Amino acid sequence: MTPIYVDNNATTRVAPEVVEAMLPYFSNQYGNPSSMHSFGGNVGQTLKNAREQVAALLGASAEEIVFTSCGTESDSTAIWAALRSNPDKRHVVTSRVEHPAVKNLCENLTSQGYRVTFVPVDKQGRLDLDHLYGSLSDDTAIVSLMWANNETGMIFPVEEIAREVNSRGILFHTDAVQAVGKIPIDMHDSAIDMLALSGHKLHAPKGIGALYVRKGTKFAPFLLGGHQEHGRRGGTENVASIIGLGRACQLAQEMMAEENSRVRALRDKLENGLLATIPNAMVNGVPDERLPNTSSIAFEFIEGESILLLMDQHGICASSGSACTSGSLEPSHVLRAMGVPFTAAHGTIRFSLSVYNTEAEIDTILETLPPIVERLRQMSPFWSERKSTATHN
Ligand SMILES: *Cc1c(COP(=O)(O)O)cnc(C)c1O
């Protein structure tokens, strides 16, 4: 049975066009792009082309793209580059709802003598801008904020924030892993200094990422070694994956309109259908400030993991709003930061669509899920004594 895959914020299918573009680099095109001979040099030419394809999706220039091994490496590189090139500044600003790639690094920085401000969000997942701007000082080396949230799809006004942060002489980095390919991004005239993206979230393979570094930005490499990436990241290039990422960026550009029309319509059909048929269900986040593909829905008084298991029996793949930490199911830090009540956070499911989803798949989910929720609620002690704490849609 082919799954109904609505977990695209976790990872995506590699596009067949991407696989095709990569294949020669696993067989006869095995040259090292740094070699002096033309066999390697030809590979170097193709890498150059891929760099231009990635830059084009971002409205950047090719020299501003550094290839890395993943989104996590791009985020770490950006934050460490800011700290290493401003050694007298010891303050970092981020948010409470970042992906672990930024969150765990920033938490670790506090034990290395840095001061970190974790800016809160409101009940709808909107950033507290007064808190953010109020925290900036001469000691602030970098502000790192995600462009779009992987759990709720909430979009932060990063362009506006970057302008304000930049005007105070502070570097701005954005984890745009969930935004790239889903919403238009244009680094031309942008105040964003660094931007992280990851291949496997946009139909390229796992294990390839990129960091945009604005021309003129002070930079310090994370991996020291060879002269690859103009000395900004040592290590022989992951040639096939870089070529795959380039092709995926080109496809994303072509698919952007569809993502924002057909995929958005499918997401809305799914969301509205579930809210109409399932009582005590609500959306986490502000409907029109989200990515077009993401829907985070809380089904009160039941556990997300139970919903996932039963959906899995029908071949439906989604995610829950919990993270398994030390054997217990904790509601995610994102939902906790938003103050989503415990009974709702525990029953949260994230659906994340892609251009490969069909209307028939959405219809199947709309038929399958309501009886699953009903069945679980009949078994839930909280449902019979329910006292809803949240506001209902
Ligand atoms: C997936 C993800 C990352 C990490 O990317 P990897 O390539 O898996 O390291 C970082 N930030 C966000 C928002 C993500 O969704």
Image (cartoon, helix red, strand yellow):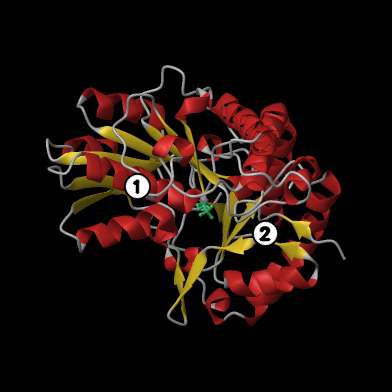
Quarter holding residue 207? bottom right
Disc 2: which residue: 278
Q: Which amino acid type corresponds to the residue marked 2 in the rendered image? A: Ile
Q: x%, y% of residue 94?
A: 30, 46
Could you tell me how many numbered marks the image carries?
A: 2
Q: Secondary structure at mark 1?
A: loop
> Which residue is outermost to the front?
37
Q: Residue at x 57, y 49 (%)?
A: 208
As drawn, is 356 to the left or to the right of 47? right
Q: Nearer the viewer, mark 1 or mark 2?
A: 1
Q: Residue at x 56, y 39 (%)?
A: 34
Mark 1 or 2, nearer chain start: 1
Disc 1: which residue: 121
As drawn, is 40 to the left or to the right of 225? right
Q: Is residue 391 above or below residue 212?
A: below
Q: Which amino acid type corresponds to the residue marked 1 in the rendered image? A: Val
Q: x%, y% of residue 238?
A: 59, 48
Mark 2 neighbour density, 10 Å: few (under 14) some (14–19) many (20 or more): some
Residue nearest the observer in this picture, 155 or 227: 227
